[in-house]
Image (cartoon, helix red, strand yellow):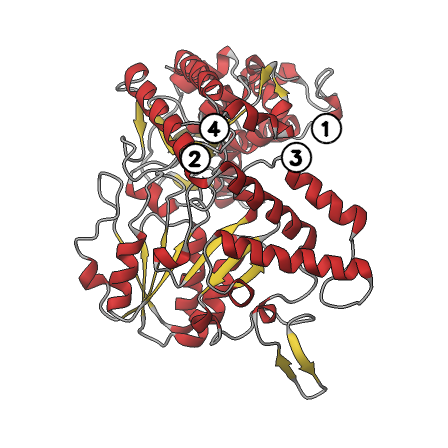
Amino acid sequence: MSGYDPALVRADFPLLGRVIHDHPIAYLDSGATSISPASVITAMSHYYENSHANVHRAVYVTAEEATATYEGARRRVGRFIGAPHPDEEVVFTKNATEAFNLFVKSWGASQLRPGDVVVLSEMEHHANIVPWFQLRDQIGIEIRFIPVSDDFRLDLSGLDELLVGAKVVSVTGMSNVLGTINPVRELADRAHAVGAILVVDAAQSVAHSVTNVVEMGADAIMFSAHKMLGPTGLGVLWVRREILSAMPPFLGGGGMIADVTLEGFTAASGVTRFEAGTPPIAEAAGLSAAVDYLEKLGMAAIADHEAQLTGHTLERLATEFAGRVRILGPSTLEKRGGVISLDVEGVHPHDLAQVLDQFGVCVRPGHHCAKPLMRRFGVVATARVSFGPYSTLGDLDALFDGLHHAVGVFG
Amino acid sequence: MAGMEDLYKEIIMDHYRSPRNRGELLSPPATRTEGFNPLCGDEIVVYLIVDDGVLTDIKMTGQGCSISQASASLMSAAVKGKPLSDVRERIDTFKALMTVHEAALDGEASDAVDLRRLGELAALQGVVKFPVRIKCATLAWNTLIQGLEEISPT
């Protein structure tokens, strides 16, 4: 693609200057957390060095700046995902997992009744499973799962039956294990047709393709700043205004109230009623800078770049490791992102990852917080390679050097 | 810096490729104890037969990485046929090996652990240089401890 120079992008990321076991670091674990460009780190330092004050409280200059930074981040990230009303729809949380918990415990507990149906999928992250189970154990909802087919796609052949009685469909936009990109728009239309809302786990997809909540047809989405080049400690929940207005507060405390007396309290209106206590202000500044950086590169260009790397990896795996490596995920680029889960014959993922570390290669071994999906495909763990905007062909060379070595040691 | 040769010693690879005492025992009379590592999904089942204060037989099934499988195999070879007092001593020595203070890592083995008494188990010494992998090595041992507790609570 024109104008996208991975070497230049790489130079923006201080961490990529590290040398690990005498090899330049090959960071291939962006699915777990992405790394940050200098501009994100600078934005956070800038807040601490110049405007470190609390938000929404005092009237002095630095406090005004802190509030402007924090609320600016809300608008910035809201525009990034195409939110029609960022100020009234974007809630900051601790991470995507907390965003799920907030939504389930607020919307779910107040809007669902015993017997109501929640439809998830077999490829969900535990963050989109466990809170629903907790709610089921509290109020007796029914949870159903869209199965995953042998070709690693959602099997929608039985969706009509699954949707009977459904009030919410909650699925991932892109699997953190398989790399599969799900047909979110189709799911939205079919959920809405039966009066259900659509919730989308955007944690994996948000940093790797264009996100537009209106075009998706979503009613709520969740994601984390740290998977989109931003800092840890900050998650985002976007909820369509009409739905959010009916949601009771989540955590109680300062910042989320309109009034407190010795008799009780009145919750604040608007998104701040979900943000009790001092929020992650520096992290919000970092997220704004991360969004600036992503948009400067261009989400379409990032998607193209990562697709190229993914295609290259799939090709090399097929030619160099045919019969030795099973890919848990689609084997072509169609509707799949830059997450590649490997099951290498005779080499346990932990051993593989340990050998790769010796080559400076960072991959994630384990069940990726998706144990139902692991069971579905009969594995306890995989070694997962995942890309970011800064990933290069050089990273892949290191990966394949390590793979050949591991197969030599354990094969 | 710790290298791979510290971790994947020949003895460990041998026990990984050709695990000793693998299989099942009829339970009862054998005790059957399951162990899990929820972080990585590794699992093990340990079968024990204790007769007159002696661990007369041990067999194991399960799946996991080379370190967990080799540690299990080494353990079974070290304790099979031994009086329970010896078994417990082996367990204590192994635990000491796994909890060697980090300050001692770059130098000699801790004074607390007599490597000569460990025999082949000493091959697991390198694991402590890879703190994330210690839990792999200890899974079988913790399951053995649990199994012995069921037979004769201490």
Q: Which amino acid does the dot numbered 1 rest on?
A: His
Image: A316 above or below A226: above
Q: Are marks 2 and 3 in contact (CB under 8 Å)?
A: no
Q: Which amino acid does the dot numbered 3 rest on?
A: Ala
Question: Mark 3 falls on what kind of element?
Answer: helix
- The residue pinned by badge 2 equals A301
- The residue pinned by badge 3 equals A38
Q: Marks 2/3: CA distance?
A: 20 Å
- Circles 2 and 3 on the same chain: yes
Q: Are marks 4 and 2 in contact (CB under 8 Å)?
A: yes
What percent of the width, then of the height, locates residue A259?
68, 82
Q: Earlier in the sequence, mark 4 or mark 2?
A: 4
Q: Which amino acid does the dot numbered 2 rest on?
A: Ala
Q: Marks 1/2: CA distance?
A: 49 Å
Residue that appears at 74% across and 49% down: A47
Q: Marks 4/1: CA distance?
A: 49 Å
Q: Which amino acid does the dot numbered 4 rest on?
A: Tyr
Report if residue B112 is visible in the image: yes
Chain at tag 3? A
- The residue pinned by badge 1 equals B101
